[in-house]
Image (cartoon, grey):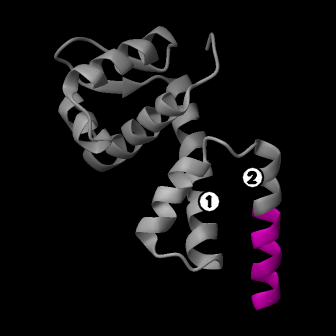
Amino acid sequence: MKKALTPAMEDYLELIGKLKQKNKVVRVRDIAKGMNVKMPSVTAMLNSLAKENLIHHERYEHVDLTPLGLKQARKALRKHMILFNFLKNVLKLDSKQADNDACRMEHAVSSATLKKLVEFVSCLDKKGK
């Protein structure tokens, strides 16, 4: 990977990973629907992701994550789920609010902060048992 991922790139990789698990095959139109954007926007992003060796995509074909893309997608999804679970289960936000906030927060939180958050939640879990 030549450069750091942008928040938008992370969001696309995360969605492609989720769609791949759910549908086995990922199409441009599915990504457009999931990101709530037009197909030309998806194509432009897919070109950027392909240049970074994060996806395989040929025009009019399915989209696949490369091993590096899969690693980045899993990393983004893990961050999202940690934040989502904290917001929903600890702060007691409703699922939609927790998901929206986690999506915004995942791009700003450092790995060190995320690690501390996991430790904090783990301590809460131990106290609750």
Q: Quadrant of residue 102?
A: bottom right
* Label number found at residue 38: none
Q: What secondary structure characterizes most of the magenta part?
A: helix
Q: Is residue 90 above or below residue 5?
A: below
Where is residue 115 shown, x and y percent of the image?
79, 53
Q: Is residue 125 above or below residue 115?
A: below
> Mark 1: which amino acid?
Leu
Question: Is disc 1 in contact with disc 2, using a CB cutoff of under 8 Å?
Answer: yes
Where is residue 85 shown, x and y percent of the image?
58, 68
Front residue of this view, candidates 24 and 118? 118
Q: Is residue 39 left or right of residue 102?
A: left
- Residue receiving disc 2: 114
Q: Which residues are magenta?
A: 118-128
> Mark 2: which amino acid?
Leu
Q: Residue at x 70, y 46 (%)?
A: 109
Q: Residue 127: say if magenta.
A: yes
Q: Residues within 10 Å of mark 2 (few under 14, many from 20)?
A: some
Q: Is residue 7 above or below residue 106?
A: above
- Measure the C-alpha gap from mark 1 to mark 2: 8 Å
Q: Residue 125: say if magenta.
A: yes
* Label number found at residue 83: 1
Asked whether residue 93 appears in the rendered view, the answer is: yes
For mark 2, give the secondary structure: helix
Q: Is residue 91 left or right of residue 62?
A: right
For mark 1, give the secondary structure: helix
